[in-house]
Amino acid sequence: MGIDALGRAITSIHATASAAPLVLIGAAYVCLQPAVRPHAMELVKRLLLGFAFLLWGYVQLLPPGATATVLGDIVIVLYVVDLYLIIRTHLRRDDWETP
């Protein structure tokens, strides 16, 4: 095995190792939602979070380039929107104790 082949193998292993936990936790969280049956807005927040992890994992498998950059930016937007919705929900509560 040449140096180039070894480098590609290590890169592939690293990408898979980086992607796997993100995809697994995202899928687990999305699949959990029918069991816990949250209210509509809570479901939106939870699905945003789950799909952000799924997409982040997918991005780890992509080669560097425009597609990976755009999808990485979408991941950031999903996290920002999710956090905004969490903050908004918290600020609208009468009871400010953390649930």
Image: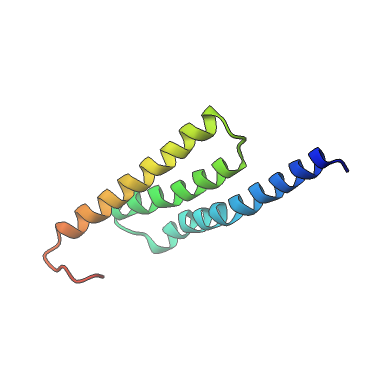
Measuring from the top left, give residue 44's x and y in whole percent.
Answer: 34, 49
Q: Residue furthest front?
A: 3
Looking at the rendered image, the quarter that the C terminus falls into is: bottom left
Q: Residue furthest top?
A: 66
Looking at the rendered image, the quarter that the N terminus falls into is: top right
Q: Which residue lies at the image location 59% right of the left edge and 34% below the top edge?
A: 64
Left or right: 56 in relation to 61: left
* Foreground pick, 68 / 28: 68
* Foreground pick, 4 / 41: 4
Left or right: 76 in relation to 55: left
Q: Which residue lies at the image location 64% right of the left edge and 47% below the top edge?
A: 15
Q: Which residue lies at the image location 62% right of the left edge and 42% below the top edge?
A: 61
Measuring from the top left, give residue 25's x and y in whole percent.
Answer: 52, 58
Left or right: 73 in relation to 59: left
Residue 45, compared with residue 3, is above or below; it is: below
Residue 72, compared with residue 87, is above or below; it is: above
